[in-house]
Amino acid sequence: MLEYFRKYKYFFIFLFLLCAGILVMFYNALKYRKSLPVFTPSMVNPELVDTLIQHQANKQRHRVADFTFYNQNGDTITQADYKGHIYVADFFFTTCPTICPIMGDNMVWLQEKIKTLPGVKLLSHTVTPDIDSVEVLKEYALDKGVDDSIWNLVTGDKKDIYFIARNSYLAVKTGSLDELYDMVHTENFVLVDKEGRIRGFYDGTNFDTPDDEAKNMQELWEDIQWLYEHQKDR
């Protein structure tokens, strides 16, 4: 038997290498490869999207629209400040007693995480700009320990905030049908890539509990890192 193997040793070596190569190919073909979708209005709950764009399905067309708001320091913040940046956007108001405190704490946690990733930012929009003035946002920012170089809390014209919430970020519900600009913000954190495209929605009140309907904060952090690596040279 030993002599038989010696006689055909090169054949068995070839067979072994062939089998190993096939196994590697199968492994690479079957293993999980992470990816993030590019969201369009047609992929999102219609309650969160303006009716005029609900059926838009072109993944390359939908991007965050141009905007002009004012941050906690009274500085003008526009889309140019976020151009070429990965960022997370949300909608809140400083007097909210329910989900906003949790969202705020989770955004603070995220702020500390993204400090390791230069260029990644945060953008929080108030849905009650009549209450949340620059001064009010500044006080809130100081209380939360906001890093001005990373995180902008913005206020502005309510119609502009409403427009970008429902036409760009696809993340805010309407309130009363009698009031066109009566906004009901959600717990959504929205991940935006360097090209201004929506790449994910996350429950800003859910830190690490699995959820069948929405990703949580831990998953947001993982997706930010993945997107950062895949858009590093763009």
Image (spheres, grey):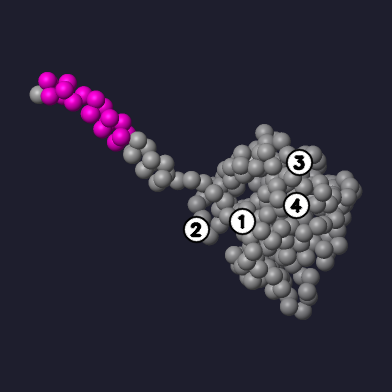
The location of residue 1, given as percent across then percent down, is 9, 24
Q: Which residue is mark 4?
A: 124
Q: CA distance from mark 1 to mark 4?
A: 21 Å
Q: Which residue is mark 3?
A: 150
At horizontal 51% and vertical 46% (from top left) the residue drawn is 34
Under circle 3, the secondary element is loop
From the viewer's perspective, is residue 131 above or below residue 13? below
Q: Amino acid at mark 3?
A: Ile
Q: Amino acid at mark 1?
A: Val
Q: Is 210 positioned to the left or the right of 186 in the image? A: left
Q: Nearer the viewer, residue 10 or 186?
A: 10
At horizontal 40% and vertical 46% (from top left) the residue drawn is 30
Q: Which residue is mark 2?
A: 212
At horizontal 67% and vertical 49% (from top left) the residue drawn is 193
Q: Which picture quadrant has residue 15?
A: top left
The location of residue 161, given as percent across then percent down, is 79, 62
Q: Earlier in the sequence, mark 4 or mark 2?
A: 4
From the viewer's perspective, is residue 211 above or below residue 5? below
The answer to whether residue 187 shows anywhere in this view is: no
Q: Amino acid at mark 2?
A: Asp
Under circle 1, the secondary element is loop
**Magenta segment boundaries in residue numbering:** 2-20
Q: Which residue is mark 1?
A: 38
Q: Nearer the viewer, residue 54 or 222?
A: 54
From the viewer's perspective, is residue 210 above or below residue 3? below
Q: Nearer the viewer, mark 1 or mark 2?
A: 1
